[in-house]
Amino acid sequence: MKRSLPAPLPTPFDRWRASAGFSVAVAALGFFILGSIFFLMVGQPPLATFAAMIKGAFGDGYSLSETLVKVSPILLCATAASLPARLGLISVGGEGQFYLGAMVGTGVVLAFPGAPAWALMPGMFLAAGLGGASWALIPGMLKARLNVNETITTLLLNYVASLLVDFLVYGPWKDPHNLGWPATVSFPAAAKLPGFFGTRAHLGIVIGVAASLLLHLLTARTRWGMSLRLLRSNRKVAEGIGLSFGKQALLVVCMGGMLAGIAGICETSAIQGRLQSGISNGMGFTGFLAAWMAGQDFLRILPLSLLLGGLLASADSLQMIAGLPSSASLVLQGLLFACVLAAGRLRKGKA
Amino acid sequence: MMSGFDAAAGNFLVSALRSSTPLLWVLLGEILTQRVAIVNLGVEGQMLVGALSGFAATLATGNPWLGLAAGVAAGMLLSTVHAGLTVGLKANPFASGLAVWMLGFGLSAFYGVPMVGQKITGFAPLPLGFLSGVPVLGPLSSQLTPTVVLAMLASPLAGWWLYRTKTGLAWRAVGESLVSARTLGLKTSLVQVLGILAGGAFSGFGGAALSVDYTRNWVEGMTAGRGLVAVGLVIVARWNPYLAVPAALLFGGAEALTLRMQTSGVPISSHLLHTLPYLASLAVLVISSRSANKEGGMPAGLSAVFSQSR
Amino acid sequence: MALRAALNRLKRSTFLAALALGAAAAGAADVKVGYIYVGPKSDYGYNYAMDQGRMWVEKNVPGVKTMSFENVPENAEVERVMERMIKSGCTIIFPTSYGYLDPALNVAKKYPKVIFEHAGGFKTAPNLGTFFAGIDDAMYLAGMTAGGMTKTHKLGFLAAHPIPQVLRNINAFTRGAQAVDPLATTTVIWTGTWSDPGKEAEAANSLVDAGADVLTGHVDSPITYTQAAEKRGVMVVGYHADASKFAPKGWLVGAAWNWGPMMGRIIKSVGDGTWKPEHIRGDLKAGDAELTAFGPSVPQKVKDMVLAKEKEFKAGATQLWSGPIVKQDGAEAAPKGGMLAMASLESMDFLVKGVVGTVK
């Protein structure tokens, strides 16, 4: 399937049908219809409820900042899934890499509590990146050397990573002065990533956007990006001209792991202020979803992460205003994803 | 009760079997689905709607068999979403699976609210009294329930069906190569849809087994990731239904072991102990990858799914 | 005729208008109270008990409107939820899960006019106090019942996470059992999660396999292990709520919460200006925790013994945490004649001798 310009299409409708606007419109319409049916079934007025959700996500400065708080890890984990996908690798390891990054970054903070910010902050980030990358290295090596399926290894390792963090915060790293609550000591000011304008939105969003743009440029415009495409579309030919699948696989997986690890330490430092159990809140999977809905396109993951972040942040409105249980939000998320997926396919036709 | 090695071994075996049964059902289903070159990460959601429907039906009718049937129906119903998206619209199967997972989790949690705290009568233990004197198998006589026994039967049955019947062959052909299967006149889309529905049926059954038989309880999200683990175990089982029982037992056995270690007072952190099942599965995965060729028996059509991104 | 109809219409509309005005006035004066739960309020356990408290407040405390959020994890997520509640008008917030303490302190700093009442914590701020009920007494009594009924001297305890509240319950239960049966031991299995019925069922079975003939637990919902115990023909002691219907034969007794009245008192104190940022600890005496009814298999002798002790607790004649208290490794946590201070209770990090299991 060539990606060059299609042959001239006969009607304006056909032209629109092939455009991005079409899939957005169809997805939005489908989501609106299905969502309304759900709301009606549970006794809520559809329009008012949707309005409340939008307001809860983007309606005011506070809501917008809270949406951005969610977007930040989603975006970073989405890049962590998109990059390996360039090589055809399907990694769901964002969760585990998130935890490892948080863990190793925290380790540095715990080891050097008195260090000044100019040393501690970058050190923390570096450590987190290395932590996430190293957790990605394991499935990467297994894939590169032994051709072990990376989807499954990353999946299993997610659980292990989460349990390792639990072990540390319930055991050796537990703050001895916090009434036995399983968490580390609070991060010193020098290690706390600040928020913007008094909100909780933090540097992570900037890193995420920068990473997306940078990776877009790297994969679309450089020789390296070309070699990735070649390795994926025709491995034999690519290896014939000297490209190494194994090396590139390790590279992309580790880069992705690094980004997810940074998401982990951002969340730990900026939002939680310390390491404890369960801080990922499933962001690894949400990021994976964003990546795949965007077709692993580094530009498209930006609006899609924003949408997902907004949807998650708007869950509050559903509980507060509509009195719906939290599961209602999950149903809506599922409906949205199904609609986006379907719309994306309807756009391209049955090609 | 702990009267010697026999009793301990028997109890351990039963514990491992019980732990593994819901997992085993989902595993069988996903093996069949992946055999037609479809991956369904949504089995977790299918398990959950199956669990809820099974519980609700058993509550309403007082008949746990109807509960199991309801679970099957619910799982199949949810799987049609995946079928529609992946086969009908050719959407990305991983993303579609996750969407199905969310829908299943959300819908079951939402409609399950009135079910919490309700009491159902599950299955009576099977009349295996004649086994009580047998060494090692003794505890089985009082603690096995129908879903466990059915799982032990379903696995070789599915294996026989896959490898010995014409339709099983057709499914395997579709899984190897859609194009070749089509040239043979096989209706590949139909087969794929059936494969997804079969997965839905089995995972719905597994969920119902969990709520109606194993725990006799409904709690939102009660499958706790078992569905996803099952997807991972498909590879350990080499897409072979005959190997489903050992693969599930590997995981269930490791879980039973961690519990045993805790009751014996082993001074290892429970969190580290809980990593055992995953590490064991990982180890088996790596070992089997080294010895097998062609990615350990993966249907060729499936490798295309795994290496293609959309 | 037409005039009469018109007059009636006018009367009705005036009446309705007055009603509306009255309602609006009442609404304007209504205090908005927010509740936050870590799990689903339909869990038949901890969150259910808290929500029952909320419903009691709605019914029995005039001029109060409540709202609730469920399934909020014990991390910074809850800060956002609290802020949302405050922005929508809540002036009193009940963060009902232990792990909400530090996030609540953060938010309390930002909104000094809002009152926070945290469940189970042990830190305060000018506008944050804590409340809890010493269910330990009830667990001790339940332990006594178990001790009086066990034939194998082995008790089983299913627990989610080794946090102080859970450790206290395990220790209280064990001490109660040991007071009646000095040979009694408690084996603990950590499930690692507040809610996973599959794991709970398996853990319950493992405990029975290891010889326990009385089970109890501290997970979100008592239903699974209660049913598992009944199925294996062993006895069970409940926690959080009365789950006796799930084990008609094996149910011994349970320890349950009764939050409503305490929450009502707190809200009233805010209303009449007497609220203080203190640690409110209800107990068996005050009725905030209670022992449920005994099951059919408990003989009168055991009942009398336990109820007599309950009287002692209620009269303040006996203190549960009085020494000697010996840890698993033999070290003394409190000497004979001494007592564990509230601070060490709130941060308990050990298990008493006679408990089989790790603390981490």
Image (cartoon, grey):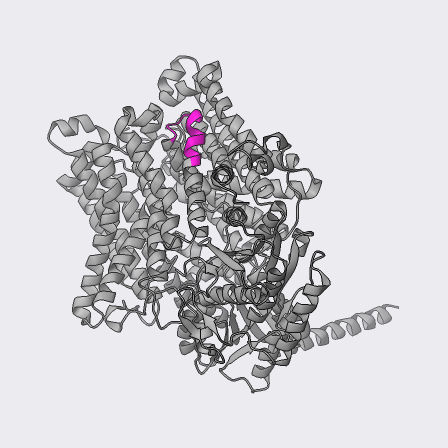
| Residue at image location 18% in from the left, 62% down from the top | A123
Q: In the image shown, does A147 or A239 lie closer to the viewer?
A: A147
Q: Splitting the image into 4 quarters, where does residue A263 fall?
A: bottom left
- Whether residue B248 is in magenta: the answer is yes
* A181 sits left or right of B154 in the view: left
- Answer with left or right where residue A189 lies relative to residue B254: left
Q: Nearer the viewer, residue C10 or C344?
A: C344
Residue at image point 49% right, 50% down: A330
In which quadrant will I find the N terminus of chain B? top right
Q: How many marks?
A: 0
Determine the residue located farthest toward the top in the rendered image: B184
Left or right: where does residue C262 sit relative to residue B173?
A: right
Can see residue A26? Answer: no
A243 up-or-down from C297: above or below: above
Q: Nearer the viewer, residue C176 or A311?
A: C176
Rendered position, A234 above or below B58? above
Residue plotted at (34% across, 61% down): A171
Using the image as rendered, state which of residue C160 and residue A155 is in the foreground.
Answer: C160
Percent of width and height locating residue C292: 66, 64
Q: Residue furthest left?
A: A242
Image quadrant assignment for residue B132: top right
Image quarter of the C terminus of chain B: top left
Query: Which secondary structure dominates the residues rendered in magenta?
Result: helix
Residue B230, image x and y in percent? 43, 37
- In the rendered image, residue A155, in percent from the top left (x then y), is placed at 35, 43
Locate residue B29, reporting x and y percent.
48, 31
The answer to whether residue B279 is seen in the rendering is yes
Q: Say which residue appears at 18% left-offset and 35% top-offset.
A: A246
Queried whether the magenta region covers residue C159, the answer comes back as no
What range of the chain is rendered magenta?
Answer: B237-249
